[in-house]
Image (spheres, grey):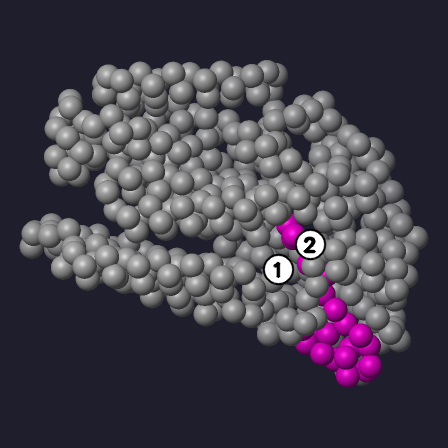
Amino acid sequence: METISTLAYLVASVLFILALRGLSHPESSRQGNMFGMVGMGIAVLATLFHQGIDAGGFALIIVAIAIGGSIGTVLARRIQMTSLPQLVAFFHSLVGMAAVFVAAAAFYSPESFGIGTQGHIKPSSLVEMTLGLAIGAVTFSGSLIAFAKLDGRMSGAPILFRNQHWLNLGLGILMLVLAIAFITTGHPLLFWAIALLAFGLGFLLIIPIGGADMPVVVSMLNSYSGWAAAGIGFTVGNLLLIVTGALVGASGAILSYIMCKGMNRSIINVLLGGFGTDPSAAAATGGSAGPARPVKAGSAEDAAYIMKNAQKIIIVPGYGMAVAQAQQVVREMADLLKKEGVEVSYAIHPVAGRMPGHMNVLLAEANVPYDDVHELEEINPEFAEADVAYVIGANDVTNPAAKTDKSSAIYGMPILDVEKAKTVFFVKRGMASGYAGVENELFFRDNTMMLFGDAKKVTQQIVQALQK
């Protein structure tokens, strides 16, 4: 039985690696998801039959899986694409809390895990338990804050106060001291002190991070959840949990680094909760203070006429497209323009939307050809040659303030150079600033025309005008 279980774990590990490989590209992402699901199914079955669980325990596990699986199925079927980022953040919080619960179970019932007896737990197991507990608690509270920000229940602007980073540093040092004391003594009060401190630290690490950096936060919390699982894997002696947790932790960390590099952000800055953020600068970028400025507003007919006579059009999707569920009609518009001989492509910013790959998933859902979708570095030189840039719901990722305003919360972030197109159409409901709370200077440029209204309805009107 031991050999069969080990072989099953090996197969599951290979499938998880193939899943990560498949998820690295939109074209193979569905296959990657399938590999991951099959691998997890094999892992669960192998663990259940390997551990020698009695009939009563087995029945409880099946009931728990049925309850959790039912809730997950209902959520998956009902969730809108716009709510997927906050759902992912919420799931990360559950992984973190699961790590805390397993650590508590191992601490109060060490015999069941083979790590010693009550009051006499192996020091190595206490180290592993502490890591799983601390990282899990930070992941839980940090993910809840990310959920609240993404879901609009909390401001997306950075929440800063005086000596914030020194407080975080002090709490981090205190948690390290408590961890050493707990590993040395194994006292229950120290266990819960570490948990409470980690819950608070997770909260404090995420609140100073602004909306523009939230996709990186989601990726970072994914990494944290993986390391929490790996730490608990050592505690319970489950090799597959260690491997899976390490894969998730490492891949999440690599993705966070790539995204930070793409945004010209410091990975250390994000990991430490916006360390180095200037409170005065953040406060200065609140929104559109001052008198109203004139903008040029156009109609769908105006846009259709100009687009029909263009040679090259670049579509820039953003969160507003996701909210309106406009991806299908955008593809329909692009197809009509192609029939008129217009070259159409899509520009994707690394942090467009509210989670990594958000826009890629939406466009894939609408069956947009993968060859038409281009990343920032590839597409930016082409804006100067484009007759039209059609910005549908994107804001912060097109804001020139990232290049010109040093006091801006998004300063230094690479943006899509849409302002270089001959004509820029902005589809928005109103003049509200983006998720980062920064007014977009591009709205007031001479070559910009605002198309006010719901993204889907405006695009449908353009489609109707193109068909005349």
Residue ID at (59%, 16%): 163
Residue 295, horizontal then vertical, whole percent: 87, 50
> Mark 1 belongs to which amino acid?
Met
Residue 249 location, quadrant: top left
In the rendered image, is residue 159 in sight?
yes
Mark 1 and mark 2: Cα distance apart in space: 9 Å
Residue ID at (51%, 21%): 168
Residue 341 inside the magenta-drawn segment: yes
Q: Secondary structure at mark 2?
A: loop
Using the image as rendered, state which of residue 30 and residue 435 is in the foreground: 30
Mark drawn on residue 349: 2
Residue 194 location, quadrant: top left
Residue 322 inside the magenta-drawn segment: no
Q: Which residue is mark 1?
A: 359
Is there a contact, CB below 8 Å, between mark 1 and mark 2?
yes
Q: Residue furthest right?
A: 446
Using the image as rendered, state which of residue 451 and residue 343 is in the foreground: 343
Residue 216, horizontal then vertical, whole percent: 58, 43
Figure check: 410 above or below 467: above
The quadrant of the image that shows the C terminus is bottom right
Q: Residue furthest front?
A: 3
| First-in-chain label (1 vs 2) | 2
Using the image as rendered, state which of residue 291 and residue 213 is in the foreground: 213
Q: Residue furthest left?
A: 55
> Mark 2 belongs to which amino acid?
His
Figure check: 28 above or below 264: below
**Magenta-tinted stretch:** 331-352
Residue ID at (86%, 65%): 386
